Image (cartoon, rainbow, N blue to C red):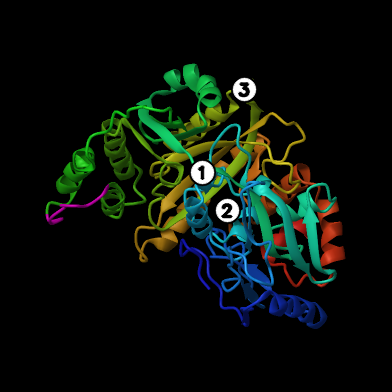
Amino acid sequence: MVNWSGTQGVTTRRLFQPENEEQLQRLIRWASQAKQKVRPVGMNLSPNGLALQEGGMLSMTELDGIKGHPTKPRRGIDKEKNTITVQAGARVSQILAELQKHNLTLENFSSITEQQIAGWTQVSAHGTGARIPPVDEMITSMTVVSPAKGLMTLREGDSWFPWMRVALGSLAVVQEMTLKVRPRYMLHERTYCCNYAELERDHAKLLQTYRHVRYMWVPYTDTIVVVVSDIAKPGAKAVPALPEERRVEPLKRLLREMQPDCGSLEGKNFAELREKLLVLDPLNPDHVAKVNRAEAEFWRKSSGERIADSTEVLGFECGGSQWVLENCFPCGTIDSPNLKDIKYVQEMKGIIERERIAAASPIEQRWTSRSSSPMSPAYSKEANALFSWVGVIMYITSEDQAPAIKEKFREFAMRHADLTFKYDGFFHWGKVDLAFHKGDRRKTLQENIAKKFDVKEFAGLKKELDPHNVLGNDITDAVLWG
């Protein structure tokens, strides 16, 4: 079993794949009695291998229903309540496609849409929008199967409900859930570049004005790419960017300079050209800086607008195989952003350039409002709380270079982690990697887990619902017991 990035893998002794809900319930009951590991796995997208377990894993691939059927008439779309009820194995892309048939969509979603809905919500994944919470807040009810209690249905108002929404797959196996949906909508997106002084001047207004805001900081340059969008107004017209073949010319020019025998570059897109450049010398900061400068020129040429369906605008190219670490930290309220968010990235960028880290573009920054799920990285009791999410990456350009890139990324990621704790943040649950937290750093990680989350309460629920820890693995065990 290998994750999407190809960075984590395990050979599991048993892989269970129930074909219906009755089989799932029998399996979990048997696993608890036999003390057999059945760690649930979705599409295995998490960069940290959050689902991996050598002792045994549970695939929900067959439990991906959306439409109703005779024995489950409640499953499907309720247009009066604006909800959809789906099985846990349904992929986000499937759900979006079904909703579009009814002129509906989800409130928000991540750049990639191939996650299974249960795994996506169990880690409190997010898109971007200062007034939009992480995706677990879409859930209005859920049916789960716990090893000790069996089948349970939880709804808003139930004491266990907020804990179960973000439980890392370690309290129970989600069987189905009901999600809030909204009418389908078009977005008017604008992309442009600015520098730090301009961003500091405009930042609060951007967050307060636009539905969606995303920044891409380009290390070793003064370029910050700003991508903002709002619901398109009737009759609005977009001023399009230049065609991509003209925008990628800086990357083509640099590649021809560095590798004259590179052959034809006709039809190569931005991501392909960037990868071809980085693979030439991915750990050399001077080389990476040149690639980043060419990318900054690409983005300056990419200034423009588009009007399209939200599903098209909110999904975007994430690049190839990569190491990634993303954090989440508070930065005031939507009414009063405190600028900690952009100061954070400016400080991180300074570390990169001062310590000559071969950090390719981008440092990506997004926002959400708070989650009321106690185990969400964006948890807060303050309704207007604002959170920033910042991700750093290194691309894995070839198998031969992969070990060296991993080691360099470990050094890079730990600088990111140090800043995370300095700014009272924590990591995206699908991206915190225990391999990068050894010795004293593991102790620091656990101290910050205890500071951020009510681990005692969560551990108490764990012992009640899964006393033999058949749903756990190394990552969840580190969260609960150190």
Pick whichever of labels 3 and 1 is earlier in the sequence.
3
Q: CA distance from mark 2 to mark 3?
A: 26 Å
Q: Residues within 10 Å of mark 3 (few under 14, many from 20)?
A: some
What secondary structure is found at the residue carrying circle 3?
loop
What amino acid type should be assigned to the residue bearing mark 3? Asn
What amino acid type should be assigned to the residue bearing mark 2? Lys
What amino acid type should be assigned to the residue bearing mark 1? Gly
Are circles 1 and 2 on residues that touch, CB within 8 Å? yes
Extent of the magenta region: 261-269
Pick whichever of labels 2 and 3 is earlier in the sequence.
3
Pick whichever, 407 or 338, lies toward us: 338
Pick whichever, 216 or 324, lies toward us: 216
- Give the residue at mark 2: 431
Q: Is residue 442 magenta?
A: no
Q: Residues within 10 Å of mark 1 (few under 14, many from 20)?
A: many
Residue 83 is left or right of residue 300, and the answer is: right
Say which mark, if any, is on residue 338. Answer: 3
Pick whichever, 352 or 65, lies toward us: 65
Q: Is residue 387 above or below residue 468?
A: above
Say which mark, if any, is on residue 391. Answer: 1
The quarter of the picture where the C terminus appears is bottom right
Residue 3 is left or right of residue 297, and the answer is: right
Pick whichever, 324 or 212, lies toward us: 212
Q: CA distance from mark 3 to mark 1?
A: 20 Å
Q: Name the residue: 53% across, 73% down.
A: 1
Whether residue 482 is visible, yes or no, is: no
Q: Position of residue 381 (x, y in %)?
A: 77, 35
Q: Residues within 10 Å of mark 2 (few under 14, many from 20)?
A: many
What secondary structure is found at the residue carrying circle 1?
strand
Picture quadrant of residue 240:
top left
Q: Name the residue: 58% across, 74% down.
A: 62
What secondary structure is found at the residue carrying circle 2?
loop
